[in-house]
Amino acid sequence: MSKTEDILLIKEQLRNYIGLLDKAGQMIVDEGISRYPIMVVHKQEVLLGVPLEIRQKLPGGWLINASTLEEFVSKRIIDQDKVDEFRMLYRQHENHICLLLLSELGAQFIFFEKKEE
């Protein structure tokens, strides 16, 4: 499966959870934790962020942790010299949810539309 196919599959599988992901990100912002929430989508345990409690099992066996840009910098996932570039990219996607997708194809940032058209 290609990266594009992987992203399309993830988007389809998580479409019904957009509201939950958005709410989790908004809580991070509203509580003053960070202006840059990042949802980590994975299938194996990761030591990054806080696991979101989701009552029903997610399609595809995905798990989601809520994290922040600041945690990514402190754990050296994003280099300090790339923070301004990341913030600019993040702001360009203000109507999106930022995801770090960890799959068999590697790790990649994607921006997921909050409202599907």
Image (cartoon, grey):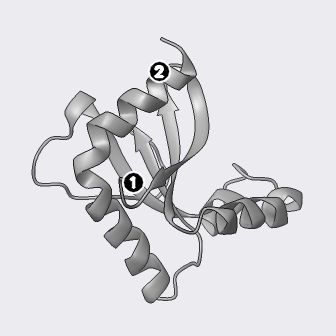
Rendered location of residue 62, percent (x, y):
30, 36
User: What kind of residue is marked 1?
Assistant: Asn
Rendered location of residue 67, percent (x, y):
49, 62
Q: Is mark 2 on a helix, strand or loop?
A: helix
Horizontal side of 59 relative to 113 (left or right) equals left
| In-front residue for pair 66/14 | 14
User: What kind of residue is marked 2?
Assistant: Glu
The answer to whether residue 44 is seen in the rendering is no
Is the residue 2 above or below the residue 53 in the image? above
Residue found at the very far left of the displayed protein: 56
Mark 2 or 1, which is nearer the eye? 2
Disc 1 crowd, CA 10 A, few/some/many (<14, 14-19, 20+): many
Rendered location of residue 95, percent (x, y):
51, 66
Horizontal side of 37 relative to 19 (left or right) equals right
Exactly how many numbered labels are in the figure?
A: 2
Q: Which mark is residue 5?
A: 2
Q: Which of marks 2 and 1 is nearer the N terminus?
A: 2
Disc 2 crowd, CA 10 A, few/some/many (<14, 14-19, 20+): few
Residue 3 occupies quadrant? top right
Q: Which mark is residue 53?
A: none
| In-front residue for pair 96/41 | 96
Rendered location of residue 56, percent (x, y):
10, 47
